[in-house]
Amino acid sequence: MEPLDMMRFPTKPQALEVDAERSAVIVVDMQNAFASKGGMFDLSGLDISGAHGVIDVLKGLLDVARQASMKVVYLQMGYDEALTTSGGPDSPNSHKELALLLMKKRPELKGKVLTEGQWDWKVVEELKPQPGDLLVNKTRYSGFCGTPLDSLLRTRGINTLFFTGIATNVCVESTLRDAFFLDYWPILLRDATMQAGPPLLQEATIQNVELALGWTLSASEFVQTVNQHILRGSRV
């Protein structure tokens, strides 16, 4: 029988045993910008029809994770109003990042799109962070780039990260890759994420993760395993 603090997940390509107290759910960019009508993705013409499904999945999943005392970490992409954190014209970020391109095309959106404190930047209402959750603002695709995320996790002894959010093939995969390079154990929750672009990009990230960068799991498998863990603990 496995120890009470361990959970065995049916991850692909191999099952993993995870210490509940040393794991966290990473919620990547579940902001109005990426998931809401009138947000940056929507204004840019990207399909956000899958976002409501991700939100519905995450509402229950995050509640279960918190009940098991797993840390929940929110990453939020956002710049200061003057865009001093965007990198400027000499940075490739200003030539590729969607919000910056949109603001160049539509100057009236400057200070509104992916700007700290604005509606576009905020986490969607259905998934508002709860007391005890961690919030990390980032200005690049990866949540580890130029942020305190690594130190926040290490000081709490966290070594396993469950990845959720938007966009699977951009910010989620970028953060997951860095997590792998930093010797965390990354697990992608396949149906708690949504890609930017056609469905083949979602599948490409799943394949990349299973092949070389970590493991994958469904949201229902996560919830079932964690609930079993909670039930075991309640019997002690």
Image (cartoon, rainbow, N blue to C red):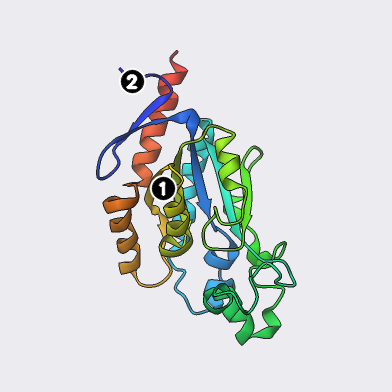
Q: Is residue 129 above or below residue 174?
A: above
Amino acid type indicated by mark 2: Glu
x, y (%) of residue 65?
49, 37
Q: Who comes first in sequence, dot 1 or dot 2? A: 2
Q: Residue at x 71, y 65 (%)?
A: 118
Label 2 sits on a secondary structure element that is loop
Answer whether labels 1 and 2 touch (C-beta < 8 Å). Answer: no
Q: Is residue 108 left or right of residue 184?
A: right
| Mark 1 nearby-residue class (10 Å; few <14, some 14–19, many ≥20) | some
Q: Position of residue 183 (x, y in %)?
A: 43, 42
Q: Amino acid at mark 1?
A: Phe
63 or 4: nearer the viewer: 4
Residue 180: numbered disc: 1
Percent position of residue 177, x then y: 42, 54
SS label for mark 1: helix
Q: Nearer the viewer, mark 1 or mark 2?
A: 1
- The quadrant of the picture occupied by the C terminus is top left
Expressed as whole percent of the image width and height from the top left, the position of residue 109 reads: 68, 79
Q: Is residue 129 visible?
A: no
**Residue sitting farthest toward the bottom:** 105
Which of the 4 image quadrants contains residue 66? top right
Of 148 and 190, nearer the camera is 148
Give me the residue at 53% from left, 30% from top. 69
- In three-dimensional space, the C-alpha distance between marks 1 and 2, rounded to whole angstroms, equals 26 Å
In the picture as drawn, the residue positioned furthest to the top comes out as 236
In this view, the residue in front, 6 or 64, is: 6
Q: Which quadrant of the figure contains the N terminus?
A: top left
Residue at screen point 44% across, 73% down? 47
Write down the residue under mark 2.
Answer: 2
Q: Quadrant of residue 13?
A: top left
